Amino acid sequence: TRMISKERMLTMTALTADPGREFTRYYDKVAEQIHCLVQPLSDDDLWKHPYPYGNSIGHLLLHLTGNLNYYIGAQIAASGYVRNRDLEFTDATRQPKASVLADFDQAMAMVKTTLARQAPTGWSAPYTAKGMEDAENRFTAFLRCAAHLQHHAAQIIYLTKEIARQSQAAEGA
């Protein structure tokens, strides 16, 4: 068995003193990034598929909203949210950008409220959910949701650049 030095243990304790605050800062940063990326897009741009494969930005936002509402809202905050994951990728209603972002912002607000309510012992509380059966605890659930949010934010970066490129090419033609 490997021994952890007292100095290392104190450093680890200091680093993890307030994971809720650090998660909140990270979720806020990624949400702000997403807003900046989506802001210049029209309602039509939000639902464009710039490639013959993959998702629109609108569907990615629906997916992120559903993901957070399910894994954090329903499973930790007991919100009662019922997820329809397939619809997140197939919804043909093409909601206005303002509506999609408002729903996303509500999910983000719920995440931050739930983070603020976590007691120090709550991080290690047991956690399991469909699609995250191996998470084991709430800390892991929040971490994976943050990584998932960033993953799709990166896709949104790529999609916005391609939408802009295609729009410029169409104007030049």
Image (spheres, helix red, strand yellow):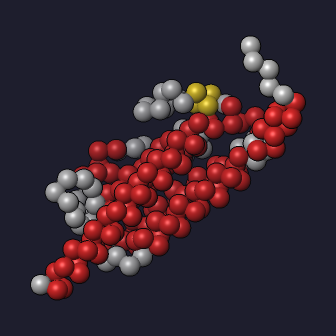
Above or below 143: residue 1: above
**Nearer to me, 113 or 10:** 10
Image coordinates of residue 18 in percent, x first then y, are 76, 47
Q: Is residue 18 left or right of residue 51?
A: right
- For image coordinates 47% across by 43% down, the residue present is 70
Q: Residue furthest right?
A: 6
Q: Residue furthest left?
A: 173
Above or below 13: residue 104: below
Image coordinates of residue 168 in percent, x first then y, are 23, 81
| Res. 113 in view | no
Above or below 63: residue 47: below
Image coordinates of residue 163 in percent, x first then y, are 27, 71
| Res. 7 in view | yes
Above or below 73: residue 33: below
- For image coordinates 48% across by 27% down, the residue present is 133
Q: Is residue 16 left or right of residue 107?
A: right
